[in-house]
Image: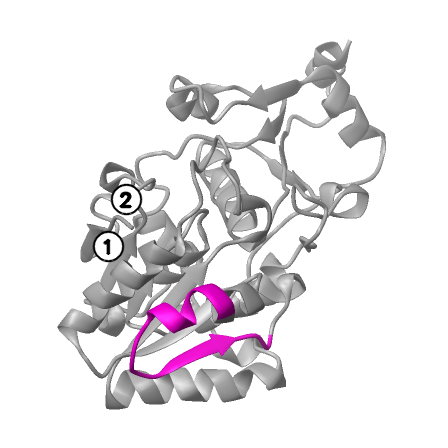
């Protein structure tokens, strides 16, 4: 019935992309929409997950729809209401399985009409040219209480060196199929040592959804040197942490995408910095995305 209504032009011929998760997931889904639009699709985004759920898997930390706070100039057509969207969810639903290797290219070949739900395998250019064309950091969007941290990071970058350390906890503090085992405190010790070997005067800025855990378990392992635990933002302002992290030259990444996305967002002048990946983030996944990357065990 739904396809007949489309063929009779009683329903518009569209592709819907359901958006969920944190700021990096939102950026991922937006890139998916961009790729579909380049293929001639009329794209709409469904953001009802933030109204109906909006939490991490443990129900502890919130996930807000924040992409337009970080990148306010994006063209992000949303359709959360009305009969058209509802009919699409019933007649043209397609669940994407990130673990299905065939889905890497298959989703790009799907014809409209379609309602996409779930995560997509990355296309070959999603995090290369397209990412750079789409997302450009403008620090003027940061709230005023972030400016002190921004000033400290910029000063460290100019005067010595800066390194953002992303320590993902929350619902990834345990094993997850998509990410494997959590990065340990020993990993962060070894990773920061690798960065410090290049510049002993580097200043570390730690970002985490559990800053107190970082103070207790990571900071004591980092040895001498300047270390700042950035706690001005809670889980409700992860987009602010992403922008702040992108101002650092070096990056120690954790599970998930936050640290890697922040490294991708660096200005060209900072992209000679080192990007350290945890052992469960295989180098092949990020080959050619950073000027220099290493995997560190710990």
Whether residue 285 is visible, yes or no, is yes
Residue 240: in magenta span: no
Please give the name of the residue rendered at 62% of the width and 66% of the height, measured from the top-left corner. Answer: 237
> Is there a contact, CB below 8 Å, between mark 1 and mark 2?
yes
Residue tagged 2: 286
Residue tagged 1: 290
Whole-percent x, y for residue 188 in the image: 34, 60
Please give the name of the residue rendered at 31% of the width and 50% of the height, measured from the top-left corner. Answer: 129
Which residues fall within the magenta stretch? 216-232
Q: Is residue 30 left or right of residue 16?
A: left
Q: Is residue 120 left or right of residue 237?
A: left
Numbered mark located on residue 84 in the image: none
- Given residues 151 and 127, the one toward you in this image is 151
Residue extending furthest left?
198
Q: Secondary structure at mark 2?
A: helix
- Given residues 4 and 52, the one toward you in this image is 52
């Amino acid at each position: 019935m739904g396809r007949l209504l489309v063929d009779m032009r009683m329903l518009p011929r569209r592709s819907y992309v359901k958006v969920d998760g944190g700021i990096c997931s939102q950026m991922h889904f937006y890139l998916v929409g961009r790729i579909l639009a380049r293929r001639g699709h009329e794209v709409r985004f469904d953001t009802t997950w933030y109204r109906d759920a909006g939490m991490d898997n443990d129900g502890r930390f919130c996930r807000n729809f924040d992409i337009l706070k970080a990148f306010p100039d994006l063209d992000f057509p949303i359709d959360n209401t009305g009969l058209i969207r509802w009919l699409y969810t019933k007649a043209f639903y397609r669940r994407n399985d990130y673990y299905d290797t065939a889905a890497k290219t298959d989703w790009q070949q799907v014809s409209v009409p379609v309602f996409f739900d779930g995560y997509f395998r990355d296309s070959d250019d999603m995090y290369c040219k397209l990412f750079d064309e789409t997302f450009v950091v403008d620090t003027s969007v940061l709230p005023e209480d972030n400016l002190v941290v921004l000033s400290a990071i910029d000063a460290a970058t100019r005067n010595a060196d800066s390194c953002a350390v992303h320590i993902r906890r929350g619902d990834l503090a345990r094993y997850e199929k998509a990410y494997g085992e959590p990065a340990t405190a020993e990993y962060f010790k070894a990773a920061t040592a690798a960065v410090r070997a290049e510049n002993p005067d580097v200043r570390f800025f730690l970002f985490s959804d559990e800053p107190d855990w970082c103070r207790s378990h990571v900071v004591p392992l980092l040895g001498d040197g300047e270390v700042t635990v950035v706690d001005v933002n809670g889980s409700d302002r992860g987009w602010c942490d992403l922008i702040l992290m992108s101002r650092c030259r070096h990056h120690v990444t954790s599970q998930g995408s936050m640290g890697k996305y922040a490294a991708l967002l660096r200005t060209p002048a900072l992209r000679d910095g080192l990007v350290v990946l945890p052992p469960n983030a295989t180098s092949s996944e990020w080959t050619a995305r950073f000027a220099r990357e290493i995997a560190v065990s710990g």
